[in-house]
Every structure is written in structure tokens, then in C-alpha cells.
Amino acid sequence: MPCRSVISIDHSSSSSFLPMQLTRLRSETFTLLQKMVDVQPGETPALLSGFCYFFTLLCSYYLLRPLRDAMGLVGGADELQWLFTLTFVAMLCLVPVFGWLVRRLAPRSFVTVVYRFFAANILLFSLLIALGVREQHVARFFFVWVSVYNLFVVSIFWSVLADRFTPAQGKRLFGFIAAGGTAGTFAGPALAAGLAGTLGPVALTLAAAVLLEISLLCCRRLLRGAHAGSADGASQAAGTNSGIGGSILGGATLILRSPYLIAIVCYMFLHTSAATFLYFEQGRIVAESVMGTAARTRFFAQVDLLVSALTLLLQLFVTGRLMRRFGVTLLLMLLPLAAITAFGLVAMWPGLLVLAIMQGVRRAADFALARPAREVLFTVLTREAKYKAKNFIDTVVYRGGDAVSGWISAGFSSLGMGFAAVAAMMLPFSLLWLWLARWLGRQQEQSATLNQPQE
């Protein structure tokens, strides 16, 4: 009997030890998070799920990005405008398919379909690269495919977040969640720089496929929780288990009826045009200065590491504070200001070092400051617009800007005009870009205050 009593007491103590430790761990985690982000009780699981979701998603993409940029130069820098055009055409073909999936399937289901489709594509490219099948043709298709893949999976991520969190939560939490993606952009290039020189491109593709599957698991966990609310004031908890409905081309029609969405389209078009002009100049400088696919892959990976480090610092210590104090307007305006600065300095000193630094600063301003603010703009939309209109903007508009500006850049080159002419041409458009940022920020804050969704 005494022995039984001792055993019973020990069993009772051990059974209560684990729940106590878990409770203590949750409390310590919440306290630690509160030092970095204004998280409220009950938000921690969704916050961490979103953080891990974006980390694995962008880590997967950034394993492929240096390889994409290097393979895009296999046929020469003068082919880039064709690759951007093919990417735009691919987007046009896929948008109706995505619209059909959103109409018929619940978010949890269509995210699974899209992500696993892309994972299967990654494995196919891994096989083709390993076998050395028609290297130049595979390189071109790989460049186009990665450009499509990136925009679709990231657009879906932000659609899920805009649907999962309220506008007020977005201002508080999106900066920290975006830092998860930045940590992924830091880890991805670090892995790419190491794996590219040792195990080769095939290792990059296989690791990317595994990470994409993990991001899907994080997405499911995020969607499993109760819905946090919506811009139209109705709970969407039941809606996460059914299709959104509407037309398969609803994204385009919603945009045409909404001045707010049209302004976002213009903002995005100017953003992607500026980024593409700088990307083409980057391709020209790198093609002239760095020889070989492996060396170019390492250079692009190093630039990505610079961007990731700067972005992570801004997101952890600057973004949330700026957004809470000044709202989204200031952060939206910082991107055109960074682009103007990059254009001017690269035009005056078109060297590899200046290019790397200015591209790093501009991209960091986009990822750390403008991107979280831009995604908050979508939190005041109706649920259909959050998925359909947003996806149309993030894919067709984004790559449309790439294609148009790519051909403009090629036209300038054929006329013998240098990058300085492009920089001068962008100045008046940058002023328009600044005005749009200010207008959009005010419209978002007004809608959030009135709790009235933008149509």
C-alpha cells in the first residue's frame, strides 16, 4: 500500500507537470512577443502561424530566385524583355483558372491545390536540370515559371492574411508577420549560396519543394482558427469552409467599378515599372562584369542577403512603430522616394557596387515598409475583392508592368539612349506615384474608421 501511494502521488505530479510547463511557455512567448509587436491576448497562435507561413514560403522562393536570375541570362541580357512578356502571357492564362478555383473551393482547398501544383512543377524542373535536357530552353521556361510561381503563392498568402485579420490588426501585426518572410529571404539566399557551389541547382529545387509543403501546413493552421473579422463587419468563419462565388473574371470587373482599386492598380504599375527598369540595368551591368552562371548566382544571392538583412532590421524595429504612429500613408510614400534615389545614383555611377547597394536599399524599403502598408489597403475590401481583385493586381498588373517597361527599356537601348534617359523619364511619374500613395493611405484610414468596406 505505501508503495502504491507513492506511485500514485508521483503519477499525479508528472501528469500535471506538462500542462504547467506549456502554460508557462505560452506566457513567456507572449511576453517576449509583446516586446517586439503589439500583440493582444488570443492573437499569438495566428501571429506565429502567419510568421512561419511566410518564412517557409519565401525561403522556398529565395532558394530558386538566384538560380532564376542566373538562368535568365543564359541567352543574354537582350532576351529579358521576351521573358517578361512570356511571363505576362502566362499570367493572363492562369488568372481565369485561379478565379474558377476561388469560386468553387474554400480557401483551405484552393490553397492546397495551387501550392501542390507548383511543388510538382518544382520537382519536374529538378529532373530536367539534373538530366541536362536542352539547357537553354529549360532555362527560359524556368525563368518564366519562377516569376509566375512567386507572384501567385505570395499573393495567396497576403489574401489569406487580409481575410484573416481586421484592418486594426493588420496595422499592428503585418509588420511582424512580414519579418517572418524576410527571415526566409535571409535563410533562402544563404542556403542557395552554399548549395549552389556544392550540391548544385538540383539541391536548390528539392529543398524549395519541401519548404513549400511546410508553408501549406502553416497556412492550414492559420485558417483553422476562428476568423478574426472582416471589413464588411460580418463574421466569415463559415465562409472559410465554402467557395467565395462570383465570376471567374470577377477580379477585373471589381477593379473597373472601384476608384480605390484603380488607384492601387496605378500604384502597383508604377512600382513594377520602376523595379523593372532597374532590373534591366542590373542585368546589363552583371552580364558585362560577372562571367558564368555559378558566379552570377553567387552575386545575386549576396545581393539578396544584403536586402534580407536590411529588411529584417527595419521590420523588427521600425515598421510597426511607424505604422502605428503615422498610418499607412508615410510608408507607402517611402517606396517612390527610394526608387527616385536609386535611379539617380545608378544613372550617375553605373557600377556593380553602387547597383548592389541601391537595389538593396530600394528593395528593403519595398519589403519592409511599403509592402506591409500596401497589404493593409486590402483589409478594407469585400471578401471577394480580397482574393480575386488582389490576385489580379498582384499577378496580371504586376507582370503587365514588367512587360511594358521591359519593351520600353529595350526601345531606349535600340535608340542608343542610356539609363540616364530612363531615370529622367521616371521623374514626373514618380511624383504621380507619391500623390497616389497619399490618396490611398487617406482612403484606407477613412474606410477603417467608418468600418465601411471599399467597393
Image (cartoon, grey):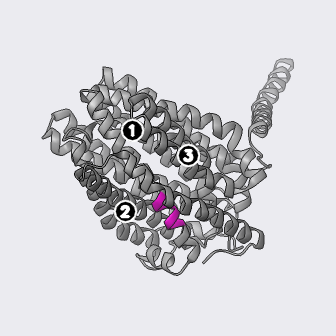
Label number found at residue 5: none
Q: How many marks?
A: 3
Instruction: Give the magenta-colored segment's residue range.
Output: 264-270
Residue 67: image location, x then y, percent: 32, 36
Q: Main secondary structure of the magenta part?
A: helix
- Image vertical order of residue 449 relative to residue 338, above or below: below
Residue found at x 43% / y 44%: 212
147 left or right, relative to 167: left
Q: Earlier in the sequence, mark 3 or mark 2?
A: 3
Amino acid type indicated by mark 1: Ala
- Observer able to see residue 409: yes
Closer-to-camera residue (171/78): 78
Q: Is residue 247 left or right of 314 when viewed as pictured?
A: left
Q: Quadrant of residue 333?
A: bottom right
Secondary structure beneath label 3: helix
- Marks 1 and 3, the one that precedes in the sequence: 1
Label ID, residue 400: 2
- Mark before the other along the chain sequence, 1 or 2: 1
Q: Quadrant of the N terminus?
A: top right
Question: Is 269 included in the stretch rendered in magenta?
Answer: yes
Residue in front for this viewpoint, 205 or 351: 351
Q: Which residue is mark 3?
A: 338
Is residue 163 in view from this perspective?
no
Find residue 31 and report its horizontal and vertical position in percent: 80, 36
In the rendering, at what x and y percent does residue 153 appear?
Answer: 44, 53
Q: Secondary structure at mark 1?
A: helix
Kindly check if marks 1 and 3 are in contact, taking CB atoms under 8 A apart as contact. no
**Image quarter for residue 74?**
top left
Question: In the rendered image of this protein, does residue 198 appear above or below residue 249?
Answer: above
Q: Which label number is shown at residue 208?
A: 1
Q: Is residue 224 above or below residue 21?
A: below
Asked which secondary structure carries label 2, the reply is helix
